[in-house]
Amino acid sequence: MSASRVWLDSGLVSADLMAGLRSVARGIVPSDDVAMDCVQEALLCLWQQEQLPEDPRSWLVRTVVHKAMHARRAAVRRTHHEDRVRLERPEHCPLCDPSRDAEEQEWREQIEAAIRTLSAELQSALRLRWENDLEYEEIARRLQIPLGTVRSRLARARAALAARLGEKEPDAELAAGGRESTRGEPGLRLTPIQ
C-alpha cells in the first residue's frame, strides 16, 4: 500500500480540511456539486500517488485549484461550442416550414373551389358546421329545417367534396389550420380563407 493511501486511510483528512477544500473549489466554479467533484478528484489523485507529497494539505489545495480551473474552462468551452453550433445550425421545425404554408393555402383554395360548386343549401349547412363550428341542432334552428335534413345535407356535401377533391384528404390538422376536430367526425374541416 502506498504512503498516500496510508495517509488518506489514517483519518487525517478531517471535516475541516474537506470544508476548506470545497470552499477553495467553490470560489472558482459556480456550483457546489462541481466543487465537490473537484475535491473528490483531487483526493483520488492523491490516493493514486505512490509517494506521499511533503505537504499533503498544500498538495491537495493546489490540486483542487487546478481541477476547479479545468472544470471552469471546460464549462466555458462547452457553452461557447454549444452557442456557436446552435447559431450555425438551427433545429428543424416542421411547423416553420414555408412549404407547409404553401400546401395549406393550396388545400384551402381547392376546398373553397369545391365548396363553391355545391348547391346553396349544401353550402349553407356545410359553412355553418365548419366555419362556425355549430352543432347539428343549432344549424337546424338557424336554417329552420329538421335535424334529419341537416344530417343528410352535411353527408351529401361531404360526399360531393370527397368526389371533387379526388378523395384526397389533407392532414386533419393542416385542413383545420392547426385545430383538431373536437367531434371526431369524418371529412375535412374548413377554416375561412383569409
Image (cartoon, rainbow, N blue to C red):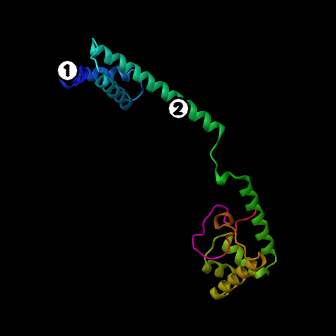
Q: Name the amino acid, label 1.
A: Leu
Q: Residue at x 73, y 77 (%)?
A: 167
Asked if residue 177 lies in the magenta stretch, the reply is yes
Q: Name the amino acid, label 2.
A: Arg
Q: Number of labelled discs?
A: 2
Q: Residue at x 36, y 30 (%)?
A: 37
Secondary element under disc 2, as helix, strand or loop, is helix
Residue 113 is left or right of residue 184, and the answer is right
Q: What percent of the width, then of the height, locates residue 25?
A: 37, 22
Displayed quadrant of residue 162? bottom right
Asked if residue 178 lies in the magenta stretch, the reply is yes
- Span shown in magenta: 176-186
Q: What percent of the width, then of the height, locates residue 64?
A: 36, 21
Q: Quadrant of the N terminus?
A: top left
Relative to 18, residue 106 above or below:
below
Residue 179 in sight: yes
Q: Nearer the viewer, residue 35 or 13?
A: 13
Disc 2 marks which residue? 78
Disc 1 marks which residue? 12
Residue 63 is left or right of residue 169, and the answer is left
Tell which residue pokes out farthest to the left in this image.
10
Q: Nearer the viewer, residue 174 or 71?
A: 71
